[in-house]
Image (tube, rainbow, N blue to C red):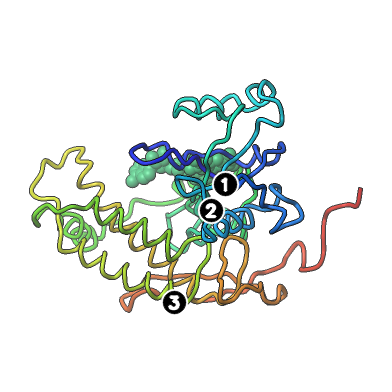
Amino acid sequence: TGMLAGPGTRMTGTVLEEGLRGAGGYLLNGNHERFMGNYDPRNERATRDIVSRSINSEIRAGRATPNGGVYIQMSHLGPDNVRQQFKGMVERCADSGFDLAGDLVEVVPTAHYMMGGLVFKKDCSTELPGLFAAGEDTGGVHGANRLGGNGVANSTVYGGIAGEEMAKWVTAQSLQECNMSEVLASIQAHEAPLHKPAGDIEMIRDALAECMWDDVGISRTKENLIQARAKLDELGMQLDQMGVGDIQRQYSITWQDWMNLRNLILVSKAVTEAALSRENSRGAHYRDDFPEPGPLESSYFTAVQLSDQGLKIENRPVQFTMIKPGETILVES
Ligand SMILES: Cc1cc2nc3c(=O)[nH]c(=O)nc-3n(C[C@H](O)[C@H](O)[C@H](O)COP(=O)(O)OP(=O)(O)OC[C@H]3O[C@@H](n4cnc5c(N)ncnc54)[C@H](O)[C@@H]3O)c2cc1C
């Protein structure tokens, strides 16, 4: 969950992490009722996807807090203890005028990790020779649901591997001819917004966030996803018609924002198409119209590829090389 700080501040979304719930924090709805027990016997210690969906259900049922979220309560664990154990988060809340140790703080599910990403091999190489990938840019490491703490572990472990493998790869290469036609095409594409009059790209970015939150967010349906597909096409076209004007190029954040936004729309389209094609529910991907996970033995992951014909979706089988469905490496205590 993230802090819900009200309108007019950038603090909303700042993570108030699951360590709070793990330590015994309670989630209360707008009526000050503890609700997680209605959804999962593990209460606030249920997995992230279940907690997010449960909060979402409370909000949709009209039991939200004034700013549209739920409350986290830590005070029953002893304010001094909370201040000591969660110093950073207590201070972050205090900066926004909230008392995490002694009072209720409004929170809401936030997107703070991208579980999809580039298809890569164990040595961090990809299909494109010379392109190595690691960390949050890669997909598949966490399966359908990332466990808390494993984001940094992923970046650190694979970042190290990528560095070593890249060094080996580079020293084995000879200097290659540059494909100038590709370079020129890329320059032309990136310079395109400089030749068009400036428009309100912030408005498109806000509309993109709203579309992805409302229609491709915590709970998805075919109807919502098709609506999102149309909206994303519309936003892409609006951005293409809009530029940044003939501005100074050096260190131009506006130009950078335009390019980022184009990429964000493309990634959003990939997420939407993958969500539409997956007619089951696994971890953070939840379809209201297909709530069952489907058979584990025939698990697959969704690969999206961009071609001249648009985005191509492919289901690739999961290779169970270490543990098969139904097996466990956990030893009964
Ligand atoms: C609010 C929040 C809380 C989190 N809490 C936790 C947690 O408690 N535990 C946990 O394990 N994980 C947590 N995560 C996830 C974890 O922090 C990230 O997954 C991890 O830091 C990603 O590391 P990375 O090196 O892959 O990418 P990043 O840390 O994102 O690094 C990418 C770098 O590339 C730079 N960059 C981007 N584009 C360009 C470009 N064109 N040219 C040059 N540089 C570029 C960026 O500026 C950035 O420095 C959290 C994430 C968020 C957002």
Tag 1 and tag 2, C-beta contact below 8 Å: yes
Judged left or right of residue 300, residue 327 is: right
Mark 2 burial class by Cα count in 10 Å: few <14, some 14-19, many 20+: many
Q: CA distance from mark 3 to mark 1?
A: 38 Å
* Amino acid at dot 3: Glu
Q: Is residue 328 above or below residue 86?
A: below
Q: Of callouts 2 and 3, which one flags the residue occurring earlier in the amino acid sequence?
A: 2
Q: Where is residue 54, by image quadrant?
A: bottom right
Q: Residue at x 67, y 47 (%)?
A: 34
Indicate the position of residue 174 as horizontal and vertical percent values.
38, 51
Judged left or right of residue 305, residue 138 is: right
The label nearer to you, 2 versus 3, is 3
Q: Is residue 61 visible?
A: yes
Tag 3 and tag 1, C-beta contact below 8 Å: no
Indicate the position of residue 252 as horizontal and vertical percent values.
19, 41
Query: Mark 3 sits on what residue?
Result: 223
Which quadrant of the rendered structure holds the N terminus? top right
| Residue projecting furthest to the front | 31
Which residue is more in the foreground, 273 or 71?
71
Q: Residue at x 44, y 38 (%)?
A: 5
Cβ of mark 2 under 8 Å from ligand 1: the answer is no
Indicate the position of residue 328 as horizontal and vertical percent values.
82, 59
Which numbered tag is attached to residue 124? 2
Mark 1 burial class by Cα count in 10 Å: few <14, some 14-19, many 20+: many
Mark 1 secondary-structure assignment = helix
Query: Mark 1 sits on what residue?
Result: 158
